[in-house]
């Protein structure tokens, strides 16, 4: 549970810093268009901070953090989110600097981040299956 709390706190901090960076960087570059930087703030707060708080509540209720599939969730989900947001920052900075065409590496790496997020979500669902089944059985007994 402590790892989930720390992850939530880190994502909250990163989300707020991403919003600050977006505003500061675009103003300093005199940029007024649309950029990927604009959504890094919300991605970190929603997919990082809020998801970690929800999983923390699930762990407090269902004790899921001891399973091997939960370890897979935590590692792959966090790696996927950090990779995805990192590519968003990279792509956003290129957009602010006027780069209209980006290398195929940008969507490729972003896709890898999304794949890791998906693997993490599946692992979370697997780690929830037995505790939810047991909780339902206890209520019916």
Image (tube, rainbow, N blue to C red):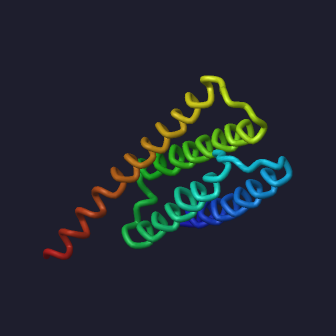
Q: In screen coordinates, is 64 left or right of 13?
A: left
In this view, the residue in front, 66 or 72, is 72
The residue lying furthest to the right in this view is 28
Quarter of the figure that contains the C terminus:
bottom left
Image position of 58 with respect to 38: above or below: below
Image position of 50 with respect to 119: above or below: below
Quarter of the view holding residue 92: top right
Q: Position of residue 114 (x, y in %)?
A: 49, 40
Q: Residue at x 56, y 36 (%)?
A: 110
In this view, the residue in front, 121 or 62, is 121
* Numbered label tally: 0
Q: Position of residue 107 (x, y in %)?
A: 56, 31
Q: Residue at x 57, y 47 (%)?
A: 81
The residue lying furthest to the front in this view is 32
Q: Residue at x 62, y 46 (%)?
A: 85
The residue lying furthest to the left in this view is 141
Q: Position of residue 117 (x, y in %)?
A: 48, 44
Q: Position of residue 62 (x, y in %)?
A: 37, 68
Q: In screen coordinates, is 98 left or right of 5?
A: right
Image position of 118 with respect to 51: above or below: above
Q: Residue at x 82, y 49 (%)?
A: 30
Q: In screen coordinates, is 83 left or right of 122?
A: right
């Amino acid at each position: 549970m402590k790892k989930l709390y720390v992850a939530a706190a880190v994502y909250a901090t990163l989300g707020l810093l991403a919003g600050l960076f977006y505003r500061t960087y675009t103003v300093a570059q005199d940029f007024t268009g649309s950029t990927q930087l604009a959504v890094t703030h919300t991605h970190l707060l929603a997919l990082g901070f809020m998801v970690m708080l929800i999983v923390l509540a699930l762990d407090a209720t269902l004790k899921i953090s001891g399973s091997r599939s939960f370890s897979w969730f935590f590692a792959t989900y966090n790696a996927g989110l950090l990779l995805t947001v990192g590519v968003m920052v990279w792509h956003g900075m290129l957009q602010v600097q006027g780069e209209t065409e980006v290398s195929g590496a940008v969507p490729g790496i972003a896709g890898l981040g999304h794949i890791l997020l998906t693997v993490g979500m599946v692992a979370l669902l697997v780690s929830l299956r037995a505790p939810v089944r047991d909780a339902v059985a206890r209520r019916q007994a």
